[in-house]
Image (tube, rainbow, N blue to C red):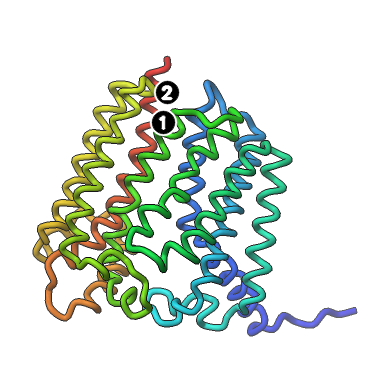
Amino acid sequence: MASLPDNPTIAALRVSRWRDYLELTKPKVSLLIVFTAVVGMVLAAPGMVPLPALVYGTLGIALASGSAAAFNHVLDRRIDEHMARTRRRPLPTGHLQHSQAVVFASLLAVAAMAILWAGVGPLTALLTFGSLIGYAIVYTLWLKRATPQNIVIGGAAGAAPPVLGWAAVTNTIDPHALLLFVIIFTWTPPHFWALAIARRDDYARVGIPMLPVTHGIAHTRLQIVLYSILMVLTTILPVLSGMSGAIYLVAALALDVRFLQLAFELHRGVPQGSVLGPLLWSLVVDDLIAQCEARCRTPMAGCVVVPIIFADDIFVFIFFFVVLVFGTRAAKR
């Protein structure tokens, strides 16, 4: 029997639907989560990471991250409709129905727990489930709407992946893994508060008490500097604890200087155009600058620096953990 030719419209809809489901998982955020989980695995293993931990652990953590993100889309769909950054998401646009997103998020969660429990172990599965609930329910449904310290408290869920990766290899909660948790925990507030400054009007419009909304931009800039200093102090802990050595310390301090530079530039406010040259993530930055400038009818002090610290500090974040892996491995030889 001859098959009917593919309808271009139907084919386009299928591709669009696939992309909508992928967007629910917040793939860029999930990649960062998986990256830090793998860092935990590599540092936990004296040699090569055991294959089951690497394969099943990475897959299970990735699925759990996607599930948490999808539940976040579901629970935030009402406010997403009124925010410029999020109104084009699959649920506000109607590309996906609420029920479809709930089923999708639930299936990812079940698959993640099954893979982790059977392929890695109960401890990793339970810790991952706790992180999922922490972000999808505790942060999204309660903290985000309850307190300007939402990012600080809720950051615990985002800081958990290295602990999950370490547990996948050793089946323990190691003190060194908790050091990685503390570093990410202190990195999270300055990172997200910088972005929240650019999105202040959106958050105010939907009644989300982000720090720039409740305490103003000047206070938020100061908190970014203070938490950046705290983060710098935590990055020295791997050396003080004997986990890593001199190679890591030198590289970490260099990255710390860059992070502090970004934080102080945001605090002072830098004239437009003076720091646009060294941007590394141009596509992300261009989008953030457009969003920021759309909200700044006049050149608000620090307006352009906001996307810079957001994009450049992710580079510092990634490079820091790469250095940590190599520095720690070198110190153990």
Residue 253, x across and y down, in percent: 23, 33
- Asked if labels 1 and 2 touch by Cβ distance under 8 angstroms, the answer is yes
Classify 10 Å Cα crowding around label 2: few (below 14), some (14-19), many (20 and above): some
Classify 10 Å Cα crowding around label 1: few (below 14), some (14-19), many (20 and above): some
Relative depth, front residue between 296 and 159: 159
The residue sitting at 54% across, 37% down in the picture is 165
Q: Which residue is label 2 attached to?
A: 329
Amino acid type at mark 1: Val
Q: Is residue 18 above or below residue 116?
A: below
Residue occupying the far right of the picture:
1
Q: Is residue 32 above or below residue 320?
A: below
Residue occupying the far top of the picture:
333
SS assignment at label 2: helix
What count of labels does the image hold? 2
Residue 149, x across and y down, in percent: 34, 58
Residue 88, x across and y down, in percent: 46, 78
The residue sitting at 53% across, 67% down in the picture is 23
Residue 197, x across and y down, in percent: 25, 66
Res 32 seen here: no
The residue sitting at 58% across, 46% down in the picture is 128
Decide if residue 206 is on the left or right side of residue 72. left
Q: Which mark is residue 325?
A: 1
